[in-house]
């Protein structure tokens, strides 16, 4: 099978097209013929070795990619809930040569769900990791209808899904945006939009009458700079592994989608939200797999709204 892999850690230039053995599914697994794979910040972390433990050596070749959509072309023994020929989206945890930037990927049947009706493969590929991250953040913050959620990085893929899901849950959303993105974030449903940047925490506090938001989803990695936005005794969800001490009784939650306990149920919820129009998949651009390095460069340069998606031939 064709895949995009790396044989050394480094910049986007280390990504290259390769031929690898086609994987076979084991018990409880399905093989998906990948039609689309989203490009995420986590993929750049795989490329640079960000997630390796101290002293850990990478197992090359490494194939990045955590979000895929395609068609099941083989089912292993014991698979009961999925079938060959089914169009699915999947959360992939890359291990060595088994990432989503490949024509075929093997995953547990519990890590896939049906593609939303009316969505094409590139759109569906933007949902699994980004959508589950948003769901997990909301689960951890545990806000109730009428409470206020702050969202930094609201114009991004995860931030945008968070805004839409929070509004659907009856939360009041205070989100940040640049001047150019204000219309986008308002269109996602945010009740109040404040200017992004160094003063975002103070702006969010002013928008809540000085009290602060009940919960904050920090998609922009503002970390300690964002803490003042949260009221005393509130909660904050960090999406970038910050392990600081907020103080004032603020509870800090770390969102790691690889630890999501109910992936299949979460993915199916994302399918339903998309079919109901609650979630709007956002594809920034589609590219050929060979352009994965270009996609990484654009992502790291910033300013991408939605997700770039690598599209594999049928």
Image (cartoon, helix red, strand yellow):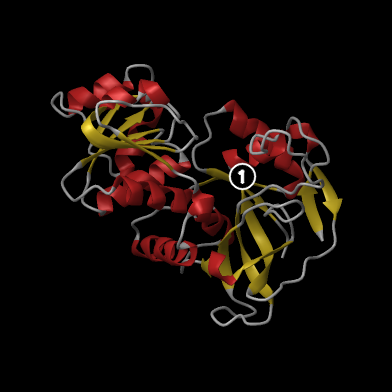
Q: Is residue 297 above or below residue 61?
A: above
Q: Which residue is drawn at 45% across and 29% down?
A: 221
Circle 1: element type: loop
Q: Nearer the viewer, residue 69 or 182?
A: 69
Q: Residue at x 64, y 38 (%)?
A: 51
Q: Mark 1 points at which residue?
A: 39
Residue 30, horizontal then vertical, whole percent: 65, 72
Residue 173, horizontal then vertical, whole percent: 25, 40
The residue positioned farthest toward the left in the image shown: 209
Q: Which of 226 and 311 is in front in this view?
A: 226
Q: In this view, does 39 lie to the left or right of 194?
A: right
Q: Is residue 31 left or right of residue 122?
A: right
Residue 70, horizontal then vertical, whole percent: 63, 65
Q: Which of 104 and 314 is in front in this view?
A: 104
* Residue 249 falls in image quadrant: top left
The residue positioned farthest toward the front in the image shown: 55
Q: Which of 229 and 72 is in front in this view?
A: 229
Tell me, yes or no, if residue 129 can be seen here.
no
Q: How many marks?
A: 1
């Amino acid at each position: 099978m064709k895949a995009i892999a790396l044989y050394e850690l480094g910049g986007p230039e280390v990504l290259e097209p390769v031929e690898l053995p086609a994987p076979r599914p084991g018990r409880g697994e399905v093989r998906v013929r990948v039609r689309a794979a989203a490009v995420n910040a986590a993929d750049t972390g795989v490329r640079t070795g960000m997630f390796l433990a101290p002293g850990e050596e990478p197992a090359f070749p490494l194939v990045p990619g955590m979000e895929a959509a395609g068609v099941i072309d083989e089912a292993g023994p014991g698979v009961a809930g999925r079938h060959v020929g089914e169009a699915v989206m999947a959360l992939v945890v890359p291990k060595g040569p088994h990432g989503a930037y490949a024509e075929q990927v093997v995953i547990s049947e519990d890590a896939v769900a049906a593609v939303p009706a009316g969505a094409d493969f590139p759109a569906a590929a933007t949902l699994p990791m980004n959508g589950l991250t948003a769901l997990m953040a909301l689960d951890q913050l545990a806000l109730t209808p009428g409470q206020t959620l702050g969202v930094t990085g609201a114009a991004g893929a995860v931030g945008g899904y968070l805004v839409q899901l929070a509004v659907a849950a009856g939360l009041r959303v205070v989100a940040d945006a640049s001047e150019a993105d204000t219309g986008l974030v308002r269109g996602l449903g945010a009740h109040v939009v404040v200017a992004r940047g160094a003063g975002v925490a103070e702006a969010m506090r002013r928008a809540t009458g000085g009290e602060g938001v009940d919960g904050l989803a920090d998609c922009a990695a503002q970390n300690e700079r964002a803490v003042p936005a949260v009221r005393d005794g509130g909660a904050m969800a960090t999406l970038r592994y910050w392990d600081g001490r907020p103080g004032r009784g603020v509870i800090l939650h770390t969102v790691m989608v690889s630890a999501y306990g109910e992936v299949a149920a979460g993915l199916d919820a994302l399918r339903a939200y998309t079919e109901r129009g609650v979630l709007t998949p956002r594809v920034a651009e589609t590219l050929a797999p060979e352009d994965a390095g270009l996609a990484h460069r654009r992502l790291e340069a910033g300013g991408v709204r939605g997700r770039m998606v690598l599209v594999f031939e049928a």
